[in-house]
Amino acid sequence: GDAKWPNLQEVRLSFCFMENGAGAAEVLRALSSAGSCLEKLDLSDCREIAPEAWNVVPEGCWTKLHEWKGEGADEHRDRLCGGSVEAPVATEHAEEARHEVDKVLSKTLREVIIDCRGLPQEDVKKHAVDGFHMAAGTSVLEIFWVRGTVPIQAWRELSTAVWPKLREVDLTSCFQDDGAGATEVLRAVTSAATSLTQLNLALCKKIPLEAWKKLDNTEWPSLQEVDLRYCFSDDGAGATEVLHAVASAGASLTKLNLLGCRKIPAEAFAAIPDGTWPNWEYFDTRSYDEAGGQVIGEEEKARLTGGAQVRHVWEALQLRRMRRGGGHPGRG
């Protein structure tokens, strides 16, 4: 907040405030200390800078600023620069610049976290399409998390994505009401052949069979945690394909959540060899059907784990509470 940079001439903050505007006012205050020394400012894709953050920059502060890209240029040029900023570059140069950004991101972008919940529909489309475009262009992506309903145009951006270093995928509820786009993203996830450790598709009960079939012959030997809660609460189509892929994890798998997956057919489990998951420690297989049954019986569970001790998720949580508080797991 008190930083002073009186000799600052060039600043590049592209993408710094793409997802979150926290701290933008403090940065702008520090930049205002450069005064007439500042000549170039790049705020490309810093769309989360709040309008009130600009109030900390005094009128006529950047009179020598002749190149301003991105956020704020149109709205604040006259007040802060006296109109000294050069006009936007020609379209072909803008496209050139985008290609340059894409080249940099393809070698550096490791995390894409997109939350579309609560955004107006027009913002969701741009937010998701831009984010997925960047994700599709990188080969070093490690974490891909998405929240909220995303339009099909955004998922199509992933049609050529290849993520050989991908470790964590979380698409909770993305396909709860509509399965459009599931084929594109699951195809991309299959490219994480040896690196994937966590897969969360909880509540994605609208994923169509066509999408699940993208997992045919997929092997994830490093997979440790899988959450398929309610994916197969209404329909068991695709369960055989995804369980076959999960089975490839073998001894690496420690957590599997099948809560509410009451439509998984018995033959989907039967296709998995004996003792496939000897380290399967935590799971939830409550079917939540009218009879209060289980997705998988105790005998089948024992077959799949080779007789290893398997603890229910809720039992594990109770034990943790007991260790913290010293009480009985059934109390508190």
Image (cartoon, grey):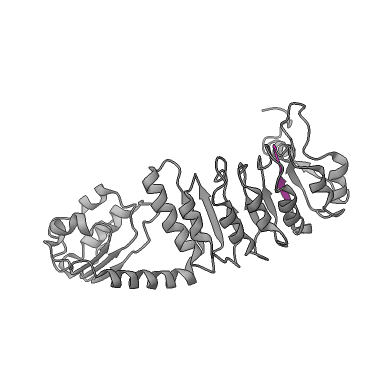
Left or right of residue 35, residue 287 in this image: right
x%, y% of residue 22?
A: 36, 51
Q: Is residue 301 above or below residue 211?
A: above
Towards the viewer: 328 or 250: 250
Q: Residue at x 56, y 57 (%)?
A: 184
x%, y% of residue 28?
A: 26, 57
Left or right of residue 224, residue 71 in this image: left
Towards the viewer: 301 or 327: 301
x%, y% of residue 303?
A: 88, 48
Left or right of residue 259, residue 133 in this image: left
Q: Residue 319: name its quadrant.
A: top right
Over which residues does the magenta segment extend? Answer: 254-260
Q: Residue at x 50, y 57 (%)?
A: 156
Left or right of residue 144, residue 104 in this image: left
Q: Residue at x 20, y 70 (%)?
A: 39
Q: Is residue 178 above or below residue 9?
A: above
Towards the viewer: 42 or 93: 93
Towards the viewer: 246 or 13: 246
Quarter holding the N terminus is: bottom left
